[in-house]
Image (cartoon, rainbow, N blue to C red):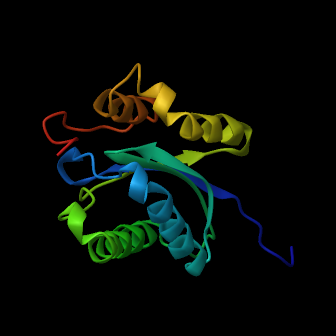
């Protein structure tokens, strides 16, 4: 075969430092636009993005040569610095140290997009902590419950 083809999609989830509700309406769209630009600059594609004041969900497509953890570190570091510089009145904005990255198959892309787009409705029924533990369980990822949400 003369060419290589791939589809590498991930549902990413991480929260603000100490789950502080810092992604407020007045910064949300600009922050998401900035994150989208970081991904574009790194030759990755954000398919869907939304969240709540204390966490974010991103459906992301990457190339096989991309190191996912390096890309997430770039997004989190650069966007944190941008928020601190652009909105100094919001205090010390930061993301938690860890993240969740869950593989997504093409057959579930539309369902994941809907899930991400309907975060506000979803969180009327389930808090972030239960949501994140549910993702870990659904993907068979082992974790120590004492430390998973630090």
Q: Which residue is drawn at 19% across and 37% down?
A: 144
Image coords of residue 22 (percent x, y): 28, 52
Residue 142: quarter of image: top left
Image coords of residue 57 (percent x, y): 47, 47
Q: Among all residues in the image, which is located at the extreme left?
A: 146
Residue 91: quarter of image: bottom left
Quadrant (top left/top right/bottom left/bottom right) for the N terminus: bottom right
Position of 59 with respect to 145 (left or right) is: right
In the rendered view, would you say 111 is above or below 89?
Answer: above
Position of 92 with respect to 80 (left or right) is: left
Do we see residue 42 in this rendering? yes
Q: Which of 22 and 38 is in front in this view?
A: 22
Do we see residue 101 in this rendering? no
Residue 28: quarter of image: bottom left
Q: Which of 13 and 105 is in front in this view?
A: 13
In the rendered view, would you say 11 is above or below 44?
Answer: above
Q: Among all residues in the image, which is located at the extreme right?
A: 2
Q: Residue at x 55, y 78 (%)?
A: 42
Q: Residue at x 72, y 63 (%)?
A: 6
Image coords of residue 34 (percent x, y): 49, 70
């Amino acid at each position: 075969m003369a060419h290589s083809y791939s589809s590498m999609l991930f549902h990413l989830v991480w929260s603000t430092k100490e789950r502080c509700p810092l992604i407020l309406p007045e910064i949300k769209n600009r922050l998401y636009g900035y994150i989208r630009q970081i991904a574009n600059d790194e030759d990755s594609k954000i398919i869907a993005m939304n969240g709540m004041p204390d966490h974010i969900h991103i459906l992301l497509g990457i190339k096989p040569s991309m190191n996912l953890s390096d890309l997430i570190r770039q997004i989190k570091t650069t966007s944190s610095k941008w928020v601190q510089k652009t909105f100094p009145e919001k205090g010390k904005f930061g993301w938690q140290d860890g993240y969740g990255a869950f593989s997504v198959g093409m057959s579930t892309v539309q369902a994941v997009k809907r899930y991400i787009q309907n975060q506000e409705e979803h969180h009327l029924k389930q808090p972030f902590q239960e949501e994140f533990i549910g993702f870990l369980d659904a993907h068979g990822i082992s974790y120590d419950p004492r430390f998973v949400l630090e």
